[in-house]
Amino acid sequence: MGALLWLLIPVLAGLAAAMWSSWAMRNRRSGDVAELAGYARFRAAMERGHAPAATAPEHASDPA
């Protein structure tokens, strides 16, 4: 009986590996088109010039 329990461990590990493999190889809905469009938007945003940052007004003196 103990040998059958030890045999059950690799069998369960094999089943878990098969389920993970089928999940990892699934067809994803978002393909290269969506990723390339996102990369194009990223590049366009990086190529745009940055506007100068607004500076906070400095106080002439503290009320202390």
Image (cartoon, rainbow, N blue to C red):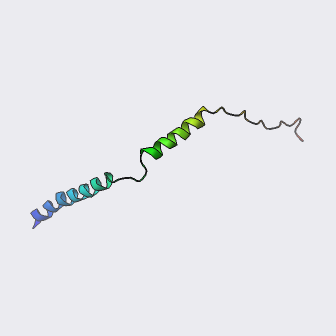
Q: Residue at x 21, y 60 (%)?
A: 12
Based on the displayed image, in which of its 4 quarters is residue 64 positioned?
Answer: top right
Camera-side residue of 28 and 3? 28
Camera-side residue of 16 and 31? 31
Q: Assign the N terminus to one quadrant of the image.
A: bottom left
Residue 48 screen position, x and y as percent: 63, 33
Q: Residue at x 22, y 59 (%)?
A: 15
Q: Is residue 22 left or right of residue 62?
A: left
Residue 27 screen position, x and y as percent: 35, 53
Residue 14 screen position, x and y as percent: 20, 56
Q: Residue at x 73, y 35 (%)?
A: 53
Q: Residue at x 50, y 39 (%)?
A: 39
Q: Is residue 49 left or right of residue 25?
A: right
Based on the displayed image, in which of its 4 quarters is residue 9 positioned?
Answer: bottom left
Q: Is residue 4 left or right of residue 46?
A: left
Answer above or below: position of 13 versus 38: below
The extreme bottom residue here reads 1
The extreme front residue here reads 33
Answer above or below: position of 46 versus 2: above
